[in-house]
Image (cartoon, rainbow, N blue to C red):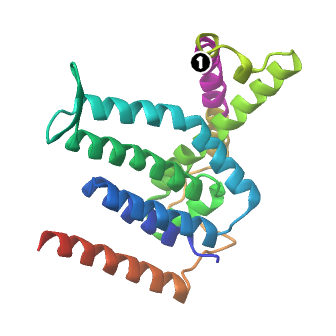
Amino acid sequence: MKINLRTLLIIVILITSLSIIYQTVEVQVSLIIFSVILLFLINPSKSRFQRLAHRLKRIALPIAVLMIFQILFRRQGEVLWQWNFIKVTSVGLEYGIASSLRFFLLILIAGLLLDLPYFDYLMAFRGWKFPEKLTFLLASAIHFLHIFKKQFSQIQEALKLRGIILSDLPLRNRVSAFLSLLFPVVGSTLTEIRYRAISLDLRGFGLYKKRTFLHKHKLKLVDYIIQISCLMIFVLFIFHNIF
């Protein structure tokens, strides 16, 4: 199913808002299930799910560590298990699981947004009547992640040609290697963005208030239906939990 990016952004904003407002396991699980359904409905492809699985694999260990720390250091609520100074409470267990599921949800949401082209973001923000400079700024900030990933992948390929595989290094050496590569990658990415800014200036960006585009991404009837339905569900969910 092909929907407008503006519709997808509204869905993502509502999902993340509910995830932050209601920090319970039930809500997080429901939102994750809904996000997975969206992934299957909106432009499903084998490569997209492979990229998503790769992201989840990389983030699994930090999420697990975060959950353990949240469980051990939140001591409010009923004591479920205790050994010496180590204590697991009902509040700590629920909050630890909920916070971990929230990070998992954010990775799924990233799978919905990060694989979209730069031009779609330009047209989406322009459709919301954002100022032209702000539109390019927001789209470039999102596209920065793509550029950063591209630069890092090129460095990894260069290291592989020299027989150095980062994933095969010991954990301490791997952390040191990533830190050593971080600043050159960021510097190279910022340099590429600088050249893009110079090219925009040379083309007279911002000189005229009115801009024209060859293609226009107009909202279809299905986009209006989805947006209104999601907003109504969001409002009803909020009022149901308040009253």
User: Label 1: which residue?
Assistant: 183
Q: Quadrant of the C terminus?
A: bottom left
The structure residue drawn at horizontal position 60% and vertical position 16%, both measured from the top left corner, is: 171
Q: Position of residue 10 (x, y in %)?
A: 43, 68
**Residue 210 in view:** no
Q: Position of residue 152 (x, y in %)?
A: 69, 29
Three-letter amino acid code of the residue under disc 1: Phe
Assign a secondary structure to mark 1: helix
The structure residue drawn at horizontal position 67% and vertical position 33%, both measured from the top left corner, is: 192
Q: Quadrant of the N terminus?
A: bottom right
The structure residue drawn at horizontal position 69% and vertical position 66%, both measured from the top left corner, is: 44
- Is residue 103 found left or right of 162 in the rendered image? left
The structure residue drawn at horizontal position 55% and vertical position 68%, both measured from the top left corner, is: 38
Nearer the observer, 188 or 158: 158
- Is residue 71 found left or right of 139 in the rendered image? left
**Residue 166 in view:** yes
* Magenta-drawn segment: 175-192
Q: Quadrant of residue 217?
A: bottom right
Tell me which secondary structure the magenta stretch mostly adopts.
helix
Q: Examine the structure image and report whether residue 114 is included in the region drawn in magenta.
A: no
Q: Quadrant of residue 21?
A: bottom left
Crowding at dot 1, Cα within 10 Å, few <14 / some 14-19 / many 20+, comes out as few
